[in-house]
Amino acid sequence: MRYRTQGDQVHEAASPEELVSEMHDASYARCASDAEFMAEMAQRGKLQTGVTIRTDDAKVFVADLIAAGLLKEAEEGEDEQPKKTS
């Protein structure tokens, strides 16, 4: 499955756990683990959207990011950066 972040990064992952690891690796966060990364992202997401993002596991974390509008499923073949229309 392909996902697009609010920052227009596209990540391809076979599982929620893989997606969290990909997002963690691509981030500037100085977290030692994916669990710490999820906690930091959940805190920032709550401040940004007012929505509580659970960090019990990667599956609920990804579902909550999508529900909060911080992550969306990307179409196959969708470019990393959206095309600008004039």
Image (cartoon, helix red, strand yellow):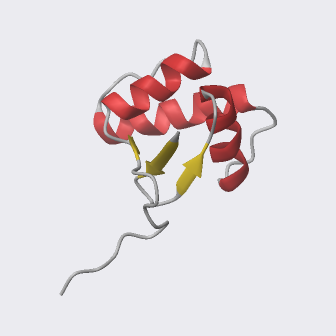
The furthest residue to the right: 32
| Nearest to the observer: residue 51 or residue 19 | 19
| x then y, percent, for residue 54 | 48, 18
Number of dots carrying numbers: 0
Note whether 60 is above or below 46 in the view shown: above
Residue 69, percent from left and from top: 31, 39
Please identify the residue farthest to the front as the structure is shown.
Answer: 77
Quadrant, the C terminus? bottom left
Q: State whether residue 47 is above or below residue 7.
A: above
Q: Using the rendered view, name the quadrant where residue 16 is placed.
A: top right
* Left or right of residue 63: residue 68: left
Outermost residue on the bottom side: it is 86
Of 76 and 37, nearer the camera is 76
Q: What's the residue at 61%, 15% (across, down)?
A: 57
Position above or below: 76 against 17: below
Task: Determine which quarter of the picture holds residue 73.
Answer: top left
Residue sitting at x 51%, y 59%:
9
Residue most extreme to the left: 86
Q: Residue at 39% across / 51% down in the picture?
A: 75
> In the image, 53: left or right of 29?
left
Relative placement, left or right, of 45 versus 25 is left
Q: Between residues 24 and 86, which one lies in front from this camera angle?
A: 86
Relative image position of residue 82 (x, y in whole percent)? 37, 69
Q: Say left or right for 69 vs 7.
A: left
The answer to whether residue 4 is above or below residue 45 is: below
Percent position (x, y) of residue 43? Answer: 49, 32
